[in-house]
Image (cartoon, rainbow, N blue to C red):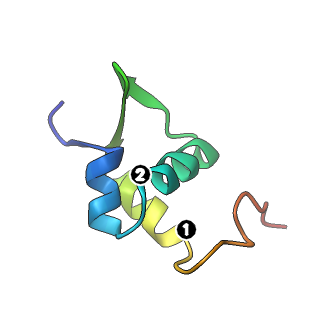
Amino acid sequence: MKGMVTATQAAKKIGCSTATVSRWAKVLGFQLKYGNSLLLTEKQVKKIESTWKRGSGNPNFGKKDD
């Protein structure tokens, strides 16, 4: 689909694993699937990148803001 990237492509761009992209996409409500592939817009990729904290483990994963 034009203007969309897969979770694998997003992970390479961000510098994390595909599983990390998929987890954050689910938390953020980005669930467009095409077959078995998760598709994301560039805006969604940027949101995942800005939300994801680099490093080993993430104590903020899934944490709701007050």
User: In the image as oriented, which residue stretches furthest toward the bottom?
Assistant: 55
Rendering coords of residue 29 (x, y %):
58, 40
Q: Residues within 10 Å of mark 2 (few under 14, many from 20)?
A: some
Residue at which label 2 appears? 18
Residue at the (58%, 42%) spot, across then down: 26
**SS of the residue under disc 2:** helix
Q: Is residue 4 left or right of residue 63?
A: left
Q: In the figure, 19 relative to 1: above or below? A: below
What type is the residue that disc 1 sits on?
A: Thr
Identity of the residue drawn at 28% across and 62% down = 12
Q: Nearer the viewer, residue 3 or 19?
A: 19
Name the residue: 36% across, 46% down: 7
Q: Which residue is the site of mark 1?
A: 51
Locate residue 5, reporting x and y percent. 25, 44
The picture quadrant where one finds residue 64 is bottom right
In the rendered image, residue 46, in percent from the top left (x then y), is placed at 38, 63
Of labels 1 and 2, the one closer to you: 2
N-term mark: 1 or 2: 2
Which quadrant would the N terminus be assigned to in this image? top left
Callout 1 crowding tier (Cα within 10 Å): few <14, some 14–19, many ≥20: few
- Element type where label 1 sits in the image: helix
19 sits to left or right of 56: left
Amino acid type of the residue tagged 2 in the rendering: Thr
Q: Is residue 42 visible?
A: no
